[in-house]
Image: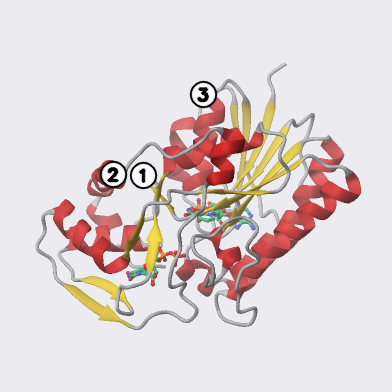
Amino acid sequence: MLKKVLITGAAGFLGSHLCDRFIKEGYHVTGMDNFITGDKKNLSHLKDHPNFEFIEHDITEFIKIEGHLDYILHFASPASPIDYLKIPIQTLKVGSLGTHNLLGLAKAKRARLLIASTSEVYGDPLVHPQSEDYYGNVNTIGPRGVYDEAKRFQESITMAYHRFHGLETRIVRIFNTYGPRMRLNDGRVIPAFMGQALRGEDLTIFGDGSQTRSFCYVDDQIEGIYRLLFSDYAYPVNIGNPHEISIKDFAEEIIKLTNTNQKVIYKDLPIDDPMQRQPDISLAKKLLDWEPKVGRAEGMAITYKYFKSLSEEELYKSAH
Ligand code: NAD
Ligand code: UDP
């Protein structure tokens, strides 16, 4: 009998890449999504695959799955600041009620559950780079708090099920990840800059651009998640690329890559936008023998090619 995996958030960026990986490894994959920020077309290539099925469902409602399940990967959640600022209550619900439903399902099926946490649990960090033992600096009542606190609650309830019920759980703290199938209008900096370059618009830098991020290519991220699932470590593990860059320098890189001669313009920095972010990946290296392999130049070139291949209609669709 094939091993069975349930992936929530399957129609999203990371969820759809995870579906591909588990299909490739010979699993039966059930994808689940309510399309609130995802897109059917991310899964269209799997539609007729004999080992893939899709269930349209909001995971904050009771989840019913027939038969056995071996693994659950919980990736459903808005992930971009403009998404979770537009749908704050759904963001809190999917991280809390949705996670609770999945923990209950995992317990009933005796399945192992991996949850997608985030570098946002560190908030606007006062420690640099961020290692897993840093407790973070989150403004609970700020606009970003809906995402950060949902993810922090998600980690807490997952550890409670692990300790109290002996459930097999894994927690990945994902740092900024990019690649094909990101939504062009999701507001995150890479699709934003690439979309602006393709439309001939100025690149919008928020604040003075001195804030930093460290960008991880999607294939590296999926490999780290895959290894973590099959490890025996229940505590959080950072997965990301430690190569840090300021947003201002990053804008210059994009202008060079796209060969577009665009200008940059400066806009207000969103409230609680973290000033510095860089993963300490020593734990992942030691535990999973994992480190990123794809450099920014290579990863960005692949990603730009993907955005360039999209239709004019998609390119001009405004942020939802
Ligand atoms: P995404 O928006 O592309 O995908 C999220 C998917 O979840 C979407 O398809 C959406 O429709 C679905 N979803 C949301 N609420 C749902 C609900 N109630 N029921 C069913 N489906 C629902 O985002 P992504 O970048 O692929 O992120 C996936 C996961 O990884 C998220 O949990 C996010 O917090 C986490 N993460 C991502 C990054 C990153 O850089 N991409 C960084 C940190 C954490
Ligand atoms: N950013 C920017 N211009 C944009 C979009 C984002 O300068 O058009 C900045 C944003 O303020 C943040 C960084 O780029 O400092 C990364 O933003 P993103 O939304 O990609 O993810 P975050 O890491 O903040 O969740």
Residue 149 as seen in the image, left or right of residue 259: right
Residue 105 as seen in the image, left or right of residue 79: right
Residue 138 image point, x, y percent: 60, 74
Q: Residue furthest right?
A: 164
Is 217 in front, or is 49?
217
Mark 2, residues whose alpha carbon is within 10 Å: few (<14), some, or many (≥20)? some
Query: Reading the chain from its start, which is encountered first: label 2 or label 3?
Result: 3
Mark 1 lies on a secondary structure that is: loop
The picture quadrant for ligand 2 comes to bottom left
- Dot 3 amino acid type: Lys
Quadrant holding the N terminus: top right
Residue 115 image point, x, y percent: 66, 48
- Dot 1 amino acid type: Pro
Instruction: Relative to 260, say whether 222 is above or below.
Output: above
- Dot 2 amino acid type: Tyr
Q: Which residue is mark 2?
A: 306
Mark 2 lies on a secondary structure that is: helix
Instruction: Relative to 159, say whether 21 is above or below.
Output: above
CA distance for labels 1 and 3: 18 Å
Residue 168 as seen in the image, left or right of residue 186: right
Residue 312 image point, x, y percent: 22, 54
Q: Residue at x 14, y 71 (%)?
A: 263
Instruction: Relative to 241, say whether 21 is above or below.
Output: above
Instruction: Relative to 158, say whether 90 is above or below.
Output: below
Q: Which residue is mark 1?
A: 180
Q: How many marks?
A: 3
CA distance for labels 2 and 3: 21 Å
Q: Which residue is mark 3?
A: 24
C-beta proximity under 8 Å, tags 1 and 2: yes
- Residue 47 in view, yes or no: no
Residue 153 image point, x, y percent: 72, 64
